[in-house]
Image (cartoon, rainbow, N blue to C red):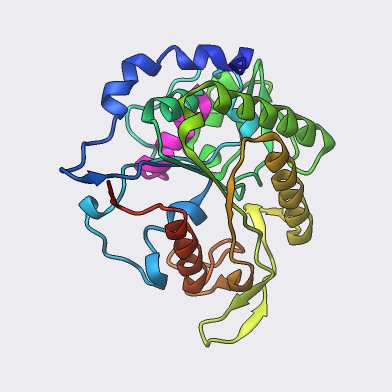
Amino acid sequence: MPRLPRRARPMLEAVRSRETSARPPKAGPGVRMSRVAIVGSCISRDLWRFRGGLVAKTAPDELPPMLYVSRTSIPSLFATPLAGFRPAARPPAALRPQPHRALVADLRKTALAELVAFRPTHLIFDFIDERFDLLSVGQSLITDSWELEASGYRRQPAFRGARSIPRLSAACDRLWLEAAAELAAFIRATPLARAKLILHSARWAERRRTAQGREARVAGVEILPGQAADIGQHNALLARYEAAFAQLMPPMARVEATAQRLADDEHLWGLSPFHYVPAYYGEIWRQLADLGLQPALAA
């Protein structure tokens, strides 16, 4: 039996108390539902919105039960909860409920326990959110996301002395590789080992489709306002992350749509190197269906 990483053991103490509330609703007779967990970004979550290449008006009962872990980094998942942090009772004005829940989970380090309690049948990883710098605060590591900056939480005393660890630094690379090894051991030692593991391989698009249907270069990319980013450097980082992850993890399926990796000026969430044209989502959805992931699967 694989040994559970030492830092991860306290995170599982809440699993039993959450299992009942986290367990997805039972399917009808003769139907086995997929239970999908995503540790990643909107490129995976939006597959259900843009299914078939169009914005889908999908009824809730046509979706699989889903757990979405976002705006985090693998090192941040395994870090100590931020001492003294106090979340607001309601999301700050700049944040919607789901991004606020993701932010609070990153600060309180609850995502791993929720993931185990959810008992997914399919667990999808993508690394597009692995673009933000990390913050070292006391004994904790935090993802320095836009949501954190917009929340106003950085003004809390809990963040005093926060030190930035740049994403493209050797220090961040070392932290990420150590945490990826912990995640692999964590999965092997928990019920997550029974899930179908899927790597959604992605890159920042270098070309975009304009509103007039022409192609043009993606330029002026920022991670946070005023923080410029180099697409080539981040794509090289993603390639290194994915290669290391594949070596460390149990066997995983892989989905990717290199030929359709084109940014879309008309994307629902606006232009970004990882807001792709509809054909991208349609192709990834097709590959996931080939792997057996459906809203409902015949028993």
Q: Nearer the viewer, residue 114 or 121?
A: 121
Q: What is the magenta segment's predominant secondary structure?
A: helix
Magenta residues span 93-108
Please identify the quarter of the rendering in which residue 219 is found: bottom right
| Residue shown at the point (33%, 20%) measured from the top left | 18
Instruction: Locate residue 116, reporting x and y percent.
Output: 44, 26
| Residue shown at the point (52%, 49%) measured from the top left | 41
| Residue shown at the point (56%, 37%) measured from the top left | 72
Q: Nearer the viewer, residue 120 or 175?
A: 120
The N terminus appears in which quarter of the rendering?
top right
Please identify the quarter of the rendering in which residue 228 is found: bottom right
12 relative to 227, above or below: above
| Residue shown at the point (45%, 68%) measured from the top left | 282
Number of disc labels? 0
Q: Nearer the viewer, residue 104 or 189?
A: 189
Is residue 175 left or right of 147 when viewed as pictured?
right
Is residue 24 left or right of 284 when viewed as pictured?
left
